[in-house]
Amino acid sequence: QVQVLESGGGLAQAGGSLRLSCAASDRMGFIYSMAWFRRGPGKEREFVAAISGNGASAYYAESVEGRFFISKDGAKNTMYLEMNALKPEDTAVYLCAADPGVWAAFTSADKYGYWGQGTQVTVSS
């Protein structure tokens, strides 16, 4: 069984920074490709950033590119999202997704079989 657990959400002012973490754990020793999605108030879930299992490839949504940075400790299946220059429109529940894989990173939610419960990020203006 795979457990996916996010942490690090909270409240920030516009222009500020927050760092999210996500850990995927299982007993099989797989390496996981991982991603962040978010669901803002009254909005549908959207892709934010993704990283391959080996950490070599990363993709970003246009709305966060240049402000958010994704990284991964491959050996531990722990992923981080450094969020800078935050905007009120970044307010959302941020969801971590994971699926076994080494080389590829995916922007589509249906590529991920394991999801966390989410962590709230609120950005005030």
Image: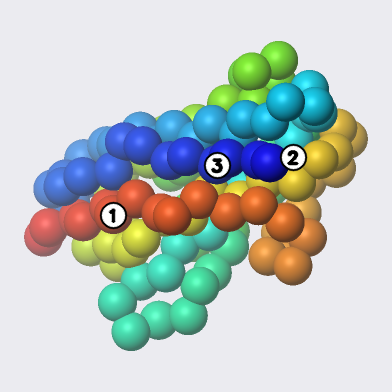
Give the residue type that dot 1 points to: Gln
Which of the two discs, 3 and 2, sits closer to the camera? 3
Q: Residues under labels 1 and 3: Cα distance?
A: 16 Å
Residue 44 seen by the camera: yes
Name the residue at 28% across, 62% down: 91
Report the quarter where the N terminus lies: top right
Report the quarter where the C terminus lies: bottom left
Name the residue at 23% across, 62% down: 88
Task: Using the image, tell me which numbered label, if any, was put on residue 120.
Answer: 1
Farthest residue in the top direction? 75
The residue carrying mark 2 is 33
Give the residue type that dot 2 points to: Ser
SS state under label 1: strand
The mark tally for this picture is 3
Q: Height in image: 24 above or below 105?
A: above
**In the rendered view, does 57 fall on the left or right side of 77?**
right
**In the rendered view, does 16 fall on the left or right side of 74?**
left
Which of the two discs, 1 and 3, sits closer to the camera? 3
